[in-house]
Image (cartoon, helix red, strand yellow):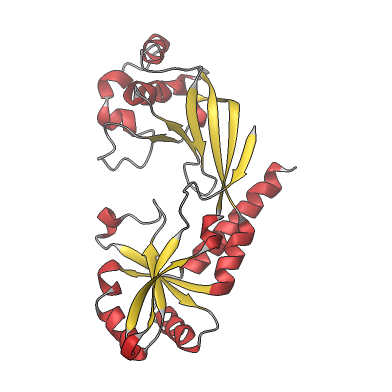
Amino acid sequence: MSFSLSSFHSRPWTIDYRKPGYQRRLKSHSLAVPEVQQLISKENIPHFSCDITDIRGISASKSMEHDIRDIDEFPVLRCRELAEPVTEEHLRKNMRHWELRLDRMLFAEYPWAARRLYWLNDGGSHHFGAARQACRLGTAVPLTGRLCRYGVNVPMISAIRQQWHLFAIPADEIYGSFFDAMNAFECPFGNSGLPRHMHDTDKSGVALKLVWLERGHPRASAVAEVLSAAGFPDFGKQLNLLAIQTAETISLEGP
């Protein structure tokens, strides 16, 4: 088992930071945020085992373009011919599919995600989903392979929140009315994308970006108060909730 704390990228993680420059107009700067670089940890577990029913999500499939939020719905909606009839014989047939490698699979665990444990599909996702559906018969299907367990470095969340106010606003306003107001106010701010899977743009119809406002800066703090009063989502609170959930998970798992 190995453990590493890294950003998984060689380049520093940066935000597009705007601050007053020539004639007090906001100019763009690339600002590194090292706390984000160290926010996620990765633990490699080479000999991991679980039952197929422990898998709550599938990463990558020909059906990824379809919005299937429940893994139990996947075989019913996309491959009913593989899921029925629900018999042990049919279950075994699905698990014998040539693309499924039951003794050397790849898994990923994201403690902050609702689905948590994912199988990293390398082929055969429809057969896998159909077999998992058939396991309501009570038949055990053991899986083994390598697990990448991702975790949250809680102290980095505290460090980020101590330095920044973070709010989510519509992406098209960043360089629209919001930028115009910040420019007129001569107030520095940064912006970045949201973490993956934190917001469903297709469902909501609105793309979002994060606004970074430096704590301790009078004008930035004033803007943060306005955004909060106007009801814009406080992403700092989301990070704090993630920190609490992580601490609770660590406490439950024990030493």
| Residue positioned 39% across, 72% down in the render | 29
Q: How many labels does the image show?
A: 0
Horizontally, residue 172 falls left or right of residue 124, namely: left
Closest to the observer, 32 or 134 = 32
From the viewer's perspective, is residue 60 above or below residue 80? below
For the N terminus, the quadrant is: top right
> Quick check: can you spot residue 232?
no
Closest to the observer, 219 or 197 = 219
| Residue positioned 63% across, 40% down in the render | 3
| Residue positioned 56% across, 26% down in the render | 50
Res. 173 image quadrant: bottom left
Residue 54 location in percent, x, y?
A: 52, 31
Residue 9 location in percent, x, y?
A: 46, 48
For the C terminus, the quadrant is: top right
Res. 87 image quadrant: top left
Closest to the observer, 42 or 31 = 31
| Residue positioned 65% across, 52% down in the render | 248
Q: Residue furthest right?
A: 255
Horizontally, residue 122 falls left or right of residue 243, namely: left
Q: Residue furthest front?
A: 22
Residue 229 location in percent, x, y?
A: 42, 82
Closest to the observer, 184 or 238 = 184
> Quick check: can you spot residue 209?
yes
Residue 89 location in percent, x, y?
A: 39, 8
